[in-house]
Amino acid sequence: MARIVVIGAGLGAMAAAARLAVAGHRVTVYERTDTYGGAVGRFEREGFAFDTGPGLLHLPAVYRDLFVKTGKEPLEECVTLTQVDPAARHVFADGTRVDLPNASRAGTVAALDAALGTGAGERWGDFLVRAREAWDRTRRPLLEEPQPADPAPLAREPYPALRTGLLRRPATTLAGIGSRELRDPRLAALLDAYAWSYGFDPATAPASAAVLPYMEQTFGSWYVGGGLRALAEAVYERCRKRRVEFVFGTAVADVLEKDGRAAGVRLATGEAVEADHVVSGAPVPALYRDHVVAWEREDDDVPRHQRLGTGRVTVCLALRGAREPEAVHRTVVHGGGERPAVTVLRPDDPALRPDDGHEAVTVTATVRLGRERDWEAVADGMVVAAGQAVPGLAGRLLWRHVRTPEDVLRDTGSAEVPGPALAGARGGLLPAANLSPLPGLYLAGGWSHPGGGLAHAGMSGALVAGLVVEGEDFRGSR
């Protein structure tokens, strides 16, 4: 039985902790805040409750596998999962609206043809066929296996772009696919919205980002009863049942090294905690800045980590009046000009509102970081846009709570929201490998392979557990 210290109680770190505990190891999690879940947070006030992180779950099979491998109770006995249908209502800048069904390729094609004109659905369907090729080429190395020691093959673009013209080069960015292959500004906006929702700027995101809409439209979108925070609670309780120890309000100041490998951690209190292995769920930039500064040098031994330069603003809206029967769970209001697209979530969930005469609505937008912003003014614009999804919103508003990238930084250690790993882009969008340069130190969570997002974080936990239990020869799920 090995002693294992886990830094942070995010979803990826807890997924690793539960699996390692089941394998017979003694696992202790040190979390600098007073709660678990990392980016999967909750804001509550006056009987209203809001998810402050992800609002929907994609690829629930990742967490089904976690619960199967760590206990008798399957995921569905611990949380309530419901497919969201329609998957989303899209409101475009010209006023056009379309409801896209959940996980139905034929339904999506028909809906786009009806709303945008004959041929629009076919172009989108043809695009998804090419996106599937990129998915098939990269799914295993990007999601199911540890990152290879030589990631050069993943630096190549896997998307089989449609060449338009004898001498023209294929599209190399997601925005290029929109303009060259989809040939409708509304379809292009639809594609762009998927990139923004994961933190990528479509103007610079590689064509391989086409796997993002493919993944959602193929495997569907799911809501967790009580909000996504309920999933974090379920994973935490599973860890506790497997006798994982949690120490909250305790920051890790450094990773200890002995004989060339990780030997434990030093807490902010000065206490040294010995361990045979250390798993870090902290943001990789913060880990290298705060915990292992001795590694910072100008060579290839410092692992890569994504720097997307984007963060999220979340506006929690407490509304008087009941949710209208024809309301949909998710609406994407596409931007015009400099205004970003906003996502409006209206779950019909009694657990999130004081009574049926009120409604809790969450509005999110991806924003570029790096300059000072008037976040209240940004929130004003987001609420105006949300009015296209919520009838009479202005007259129903009781109060709002704005969560900025600075709040995300305080709670998670980084203002950025990491994106999932993408092939292409010369390898620039591959997160840090799960194996760090220091033997015995492993990286889990959204900042490490295979990247950000609930499903990806869960996969990282599974990969780290496999590497610890089976060693560096572990090649992932089979």
Image: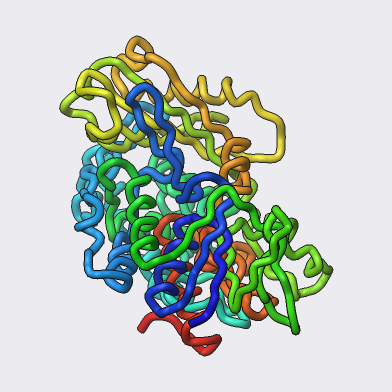
Q: Name the residue at 45% across, 38% down.
A: 52
Is residue 116 something that shows in the picture? Answer: yes
Whether residue 290 sits left or right of residue 147 in the image: it is right
Q: Residue 452, image x and y in percent?
A: 50, 57
Q: Residue at x 71, y 34 (%)?
A: 371
| Residue depicted at 38% across the width and 80% down the height | 477
Residue, x 80% and y 73% (percent of image)? 299
Q: Is residue 166 visible?
A: no
Occupied quadrant, residue 317: top left
Q: Nearer the viewer, residue 349 or 427?
A: 349
Q: Residue furthest right?
A: 298
> For the view shown, which residue lies furthest in the top direction?
395
Q: Position of residue 272 (x, y in %)?
A: 69, 65
Q: Is residue 19 left or right of residue 156?
A: left
Residue nearest the viewer, comparing 30 with 158: 30
* Quadrant housing residue 68: bottom left
In the rendering, at what x and y percent does residue 192 appear?
Answer: 47, 46
Q: Locate residue 116, reporting x and y percent.
A: 29, 39
Vertical side of 299 occupied by 176: above or below:
above
